[in-house]
Image (cartoon, rainbow, N blue to C red):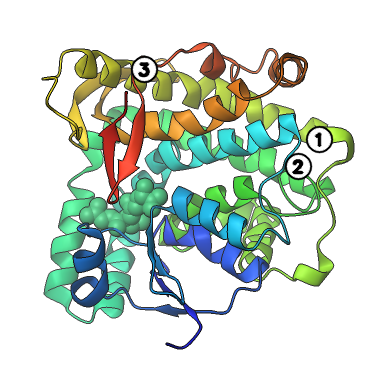
Amino acid sequence: MSGLFRYHGAEASYFSAKVRPALRYKAIHYVEVLPDYRGVILPRTGLAFIPVLVTPEDEVLQDTSDILDALEKRFPQPPLYPTTPVQQVVAYLWELYADEFMILPAMHYRWSFPESEAKARQDFAAMGGNPEVANRFADRMSGSLAMLGVSEKTREPIEAHLRTLLDALSVHFESHGYLLGERMSLADCALMGPLYAHLYLDAVSGRLLRETAPRVCHWIERMNRPDPDAAGEWLEKDALASTLRPLLELIGRDAVPVILDGIAAFEDWADDRPSSQEEPPRIVGQYRAALGGVEFQRATSAYSLYMLQRPVDAYRDLPKAERAQVDAALEGTGCAELFRYEPRHRLAKRNYKLIFRG
Ligand SMILES: N[C@@H](CCC(=O)N[C@@H](CS)C(=O)NCC(=O)O)C(=O)O
């Protein structure tokens, strides 16, 4: 055993980009290897997802939220998870947004533009070494656009969302190094998934970022090359920067309704499931969502509820006075809706699979 963590990930992989900055920031001794599906990932997790992190003790961690939780526990310094109420809940909120909503612009910009698609196919072939296998994978990914809600109909509101996000992030990064202040957090890591692995690396969106959002590009570069000795602190007194407010308003306006409608549809399905069914399927049909006034259909995913539980648990575990501080910080952003929603079902993990609990 080498004493090293082994990180099975890929440069163009959304979720690989979420954990990599944390490994570097925490100065964890690790190597990043090309994903070993046959030897490690499939036999050990039963799934074909990346990233996967194998610890020096040969424990296999899968799912970026679970990987980051485990890393924070084992290497608490430097921290990634704020412990003050507002910043903690807001960090989980960004994770939910980045994992569940930002997939729309990320997939749109990779697969709706021939130039981006061609580059992605070449990148996949270079990673895997077999162009046919790479193209089959690319076909599956590009074929999932309609299921995700990316279509000619949603193109305009998706692109408008990204432009507004980039403008608001550019303003924020004029005054602050990271989302919560001068230190990276879970929030920044999660946002790296869509922003680095897809939007920065892909041809058309990469140009858009470089031409219109150089400060966002610089944040991406700093996230990928963190200097642990140069880190500052999150804002004092659990404050949020005033420049974060337009970002939270954007999340509240566009992403929160799409996410909550999906969770409500999943819960309706779960109400009627056979009582013997412990494991939900990944996708349970489609639900109606709306973005920028455009109605569309999107796959209903069990995983969205698992991700919602993180900010909601963090919020509900707070003493009343601290919950009031979170309410005050999110007042009028549209994000507080998430905490008013009361899930009727609860999901947990067993052997890397989601299961109903209780
Ligand atoms: N919730 C998982 C998602 C992992 C995931 O979707 N990974 C993508 C690559 S970014 C993948 O391996 N997809 C393979 C597939 O969909 O078949 C996590 O956070 O790790």
Say left or right for 192 vs 236.
Answer: left
For the point 53% across and 25% down, the residue is: 312
Mark 2 or 1 closer to N-term? 2
Res. 42 image quadrant: bottom left
Mark 3 or 2 closer to N-term? 2
For the point 74% across and 43% down, the residue is: 180
Q: Mark 2 points at which residue?
A: 172
Say left or right for 349 vs 86.
Answer: left
Q: Name the residue under label 1.
A: 241
Q: Mark 3 points at which residue?
A: 261
Q: Percent from the top left, x then y, of residue 327?
A: 70, 15
Looking at the picture, which amino acid does disc 2 mark? His
Q: Percent from the top left, x then y, of residue 279?
A: 19, 35
Are circles 2 and 1 on residues that touch, CB within 8 Å? yes
- Mark 2 C-beta closer than 8 Å to ligand 1: no
Whether residue 170 can be seen here: yes
Q: Residues within 10 Å of mark 2 (few under 14, many from 20)?
A: many
Marking on residue 166: none
Whether residue 113 can be seen here: no
* Eye-nearest disc, 2 or 1: 1
